[in-house]
């Protein structure tokens, strides 16, 4: 059977080709009876618009990019990213968008990829994850005008749309929980590579201040969110004899648990541990990990929804969305209990 065209649908519906195009692309100000007649013909014939022709008519490709400034190895071994991508994929499928993934493993990759993205009209918009403090490429997207949403609070440029979880409250809640357990030498394995790490450290420090504990440099070491960096950091902290540690990611916490185990110390008897994320490995850890749950999948869903609105004809001004975090108590701090929300 010959493939139907817009002209064929227009002839069958008794309207112009332009009207069919407007109905397909959701334009307003079309008479309800005309819209219904065109949609009925499309349904009856099983007509599927040519995506290239449709993008030319609507000035949109229906494709959005996901830019992750990390290596493929990091992205596919750290369970944070598959969980985030799952939420993004759910939303793009629901909104009939196509997702294109861009991983930036090096400075050369970054420069080449960003230059390519901005020099073509391939993408309608972009989601950027975990922007870095140094060598931020967000200003290049701002100067170009391509719609984008940032996952994570920006250090500057507060007039852009971003979505994040309440990292400060999560860091505070983790340290406070350890202090309320009677721990007094509460260490932190943090990260200072982006604002998420900064805010988690700030929450930890505020809890120590509020409960009258003195910060000790020997109890504060930063990693890079990898398991190995958590292991290395904890080996450095053990010399200061902590009785508890807040770790700024579950992945680093797995390395922390290994370092404690190799030192022939017990969790939680000798050292209580709290992570951050509540990824699947947290429940499978030995012992199961008390952690701060952030709604990673929901971050991905909302990022797509925000970007979809920015791409639309009536794009809103910059939107800042902060989602709550929740304390999930498991055996690494004692007996498991119900989660406690920041709300």
Image: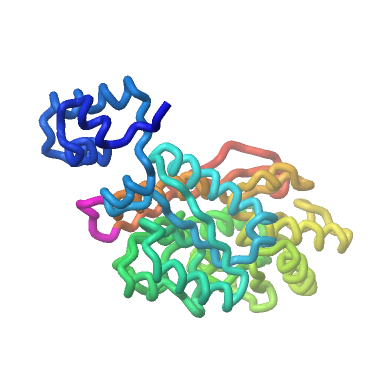
Residue 207 visible? The answer is no
| Position of 139 relative to 31 (above/below) | below
Residue 283 seen: yes
- The vertical placement of 322 against 87, above or below, is below
| Residue at image coords 72%, 65% | 230
In magenta segment, residue 315:
yes
Q: Nearer the viewer, residue 17 or 247?
A: 17
Picture quarter containing residue 255? bottom right
Q: Which residue is rendered at x = 63% and y = 58% of the image?
A: 75
The quarter of the image holding the N terminus is: top left
138 relative to 67 in the view: left or right: left
Q: Main secondary structure of the magenta part?
A: loop
In the image, 333 versus 130, the foreground residue is: 130
Q: Residue at x 51, y 45 (%)?
A: 297
Q: Residue furthest front?
A: 2
- Figure coloring: rainbow
Would you identify the image quadrant in which residue 121 lies? bottom left
Total marks shown come to 0
In the rendered image, the quadrant that contains the C terminus is: top left
Residue 245 higher or lower than 180, as above or below? below
Magenta range is 312-318
Vertical comparison of 13 with 204: above or below: above
Residue 338 image offset from top left, x and y in percent: 58, 37
Q: Residue at x 26, y 41 (%)?
A: 25
Q: Position of residue 139 (x, y in %)?
A: 38, 75
Task: Single out the residue that lies furthest toward the top.
Answer: 44
**Residue 227 horizontal/vertical position (percent):** 72, 62
Q: Is residue 259 magenta?
A: no
Which of 189 and 214 lies nearest the eye of the viewer?
189
Instruction: Say left or right for 13 vs 299.
Output: left
At which x and y percent is residue 56?
30, 52
């Amino acid at each position: 059977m010959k493939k139907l065209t817009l002209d064929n649908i227009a002839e069958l519906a008794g309207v112009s080709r332009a009207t069919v195009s407007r109905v397909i692309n959701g334009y307003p100000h079309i008479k309800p009876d005309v819209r219904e007649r065109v949609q009925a013909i499309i349904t009856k014939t099983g007509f599927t618009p040519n995506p290239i022709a449709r993008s030319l008519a609507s000035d949109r490709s229906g494709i959005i990019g996901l830019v992750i400034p990390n290596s493929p190895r990091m992205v596919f071994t750290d369970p944070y990213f598959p969980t985030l991508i799952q939420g993004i994929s759910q939303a793009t499928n629901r909104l009939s968008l196509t997702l294109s993934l861009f991983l930036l493993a090096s400075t050369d990759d970054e420069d080449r990829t960003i230059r390519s993205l901005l020099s073509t009209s391939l993408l309608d918009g972009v989601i950027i994850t975990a922007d870095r403090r140094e060598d931020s490429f967000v200003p290049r997207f701002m100067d170009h005008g391509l719609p984008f949403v940032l996952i994570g609070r920006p250090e500057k440029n507060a007039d852009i749309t971003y979505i994040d979880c309440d990292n400060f409250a999560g860091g505070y809640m983790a340290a406070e929980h350890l202090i309320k357990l009677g721990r007094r030498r509460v260490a932190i394995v943090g990260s200072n590579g982006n604002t998420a790490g900064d805010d988690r450290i700030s929450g930890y420090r505020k809890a120590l201040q509020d409960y009258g504990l003195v910060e000790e440099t020997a109890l504060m070491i930063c990693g890079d969110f990898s398991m190995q960096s958590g292991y290395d950091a904890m080996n450095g902290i053990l010399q200061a004899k902590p009785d508890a540690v807040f770790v700024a990611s579950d992945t680093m916490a797995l390395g922390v648990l290994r370092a404690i185990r190799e030192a022939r110390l017990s969790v939680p008897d000798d050292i209580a541990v709290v992570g951050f994320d509540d990824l699947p490995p947290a429940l499978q850890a030995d012992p199961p990990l008390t952690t701060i749950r952030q709604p990673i999948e929901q971050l991905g869903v909302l990022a797509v929804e925000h970007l979809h609105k920015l791409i639309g004809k009536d794009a809103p001004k910059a939107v800042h969305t902060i989602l709550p975090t929740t304390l999930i108590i498991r055996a690494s701090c004692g007996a498991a209990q119900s989660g406690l929300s920041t709300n």
